Image: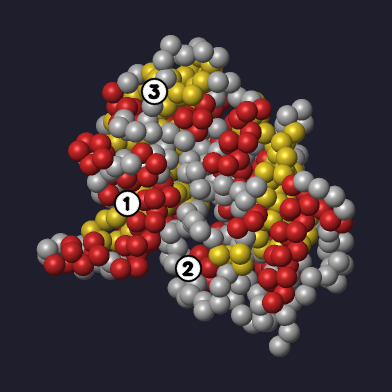
Amino acid sequence: MRAALPRLIDRRGCGTVERARVTTAATGPTTRHARARERLLAQYAAIPAGDPVRLAKHTSNLFRPRTKVSRPGLDVSDLDGILGVDPDGRTADVQGMTTYEHLVDATLPHGLMPTVVPQLKTITLGGAVTGLGIESSSFREGLPHEAVREVEVLTGAGEIVVATPTEHADLFRAFPNSYGTLGYAVRLVIDLVPVRPYVHLRHVRFGRPAELTAAVGEIVASGQWSGEPVEFLDGTVFSASECYLTLGSFVDSAPYTSDYTGQQIFYRSIQHRQQDYLSVRDYLWRWDTDWFWCSRAFGAQNPWLRRVWPKRYLRSDVYWKMIALENRYHLVSRLDQARGKLPRERLIQDVEIPLERTADFLDWFLREVPVQPVWVCPLKLRPAGPAGAPVAGETPWPLYPLVAGETYVNVGFWSTVPIRPGRTDGDVNRDVERVVAGHGGHKSLYSDAYYDEEQFRALYGGAGYAAVKQRYDPDGRLLDLYAKAVMRR
């Protein structure tokens, strides 16, 4: 048995592995990054061939079962840092394990933000690119990976390569939605966009999902609503007869600003206010305080408990740790069982549905699945970015093949549902997968998946993924995407 050793030249013809770029600098963040890279390569080389490889991360936003291994994971704690922000070029050079909270803190003083800022503070930049991220700017700016100019990847072969639209282009295109099965993002250079100090919100109510999706089509086409510009767009569906779009636009001044980091709860304000104002930073993190609405499962929205709940613990990562404890010890499940309650199935999903089919999907979901509210967020592939302008009708990102020029709507639902007599755990998730596929959609792979292998391969990369996998992980050191997303290990 032998360890995979770092090499300066990729033997399989992938090109030169770019190491000189960071090792020649004498001081500063670049030198620290070079040292972090060398430590990472040394850790990887020390793992015996055949042993599983994983990251040792303090936080996670995944809800899939994790592979159980006896060896510790790769320590990536020194890859959380900003190497530089270029205000003139509107780019940031960022280590792969940097959280969006840290990234936003570094860019906002320059009047800039990432093109898309996923809703939860501890999502990492590398995680949002190798997985998927989405937010209310996605109807204009697409997904986080579309803003990437270059990405350093620690591949399954134990090498660090720099992938761009023209160098290692196959890896660059296949990396989004590969979930660490082709390698791990070590450093990324991304586009930034300008911001203004405040965001003005309008909460517009609609009576039916079809009315909401019709308005989405108008806004995506025109960039405005009722004569005012729309720069951010998402929505909340409380029931089949109570649907809202939240329209955001940058402004230089505000008559007041609301604070949803303490006693007030953002999603409840949608039902009671027609307009609102937030600082740009508070807008970006408006969902994090209550993990959208999921904090209610822990009692954090109870007025009495909320008064004594320390403000610093009103954060999505705190709730995630509480979920992790429940997954480990099943205390709530045991208590429910003792009370004679039905067991429950976890239903935590984000799916992308073509706009013209979204109302039908929402009608089915609201009728058949007892989970409310539901989040909706329109998206389109970015008109032009570092990889160029996508050709209408093509699918430039093979592992999540959204069609260029088409508008989709992300539908997010995060809860549990009772397992009815005669049903088994996973049945509702399978129903969702079937209906999503029937509506021409895809679902994100951060949570449970139940596809059979043939269907999964057809939906997520197929033979193209296999070719890239063979090139950059020839010995199978990293899990296959189907094994990681679907199979229980």
Dot 1 falls on a residue whose secondary structure is strand
The reply, left or right, for residue 218 in relation to residue 175 is left
Marked residue nearer the N-terminal end (1 or 3): 3
Instruction: List the single residue furthest toward the front.
Output: 27
Residue receiving disc 1: 415
The residue sitting at 42% across, 37% down in the picture is 287
The residue sitting at 34% across, 27% down in the picture is 270
Residues at marks 1 and 3, CA–CA distance in whole angstroms: 27 Å
* Residue contact between numbered discs 3 and 2, judged by CB atoms under 8 Å: no
- Would residue 264 be visible to someone looking at this image? yes
Is 359 drawn above or below residue 193 in the view shown? Answer: below
Residue receiving disc 2: 66
Residues at marks 3 and 2, CA–CA distance in whole angstroms: 39 Å
Disc 3: CA contacts within 10 A as few (<14), some (14-19) or many (>=20): some
The amino acid marked with disc number 3 is Ser
Dot 3 falls on a residue whose secondary structure is loop
Q: Nearer the viewer, residue 8 or 71?
A: 71
Is 84 drawn above or below residue 485 in the view shown? Answer: above
- Would residue 468 be visible to someone looking at this image? no
The amino acid marked with disc number 2 is Arg
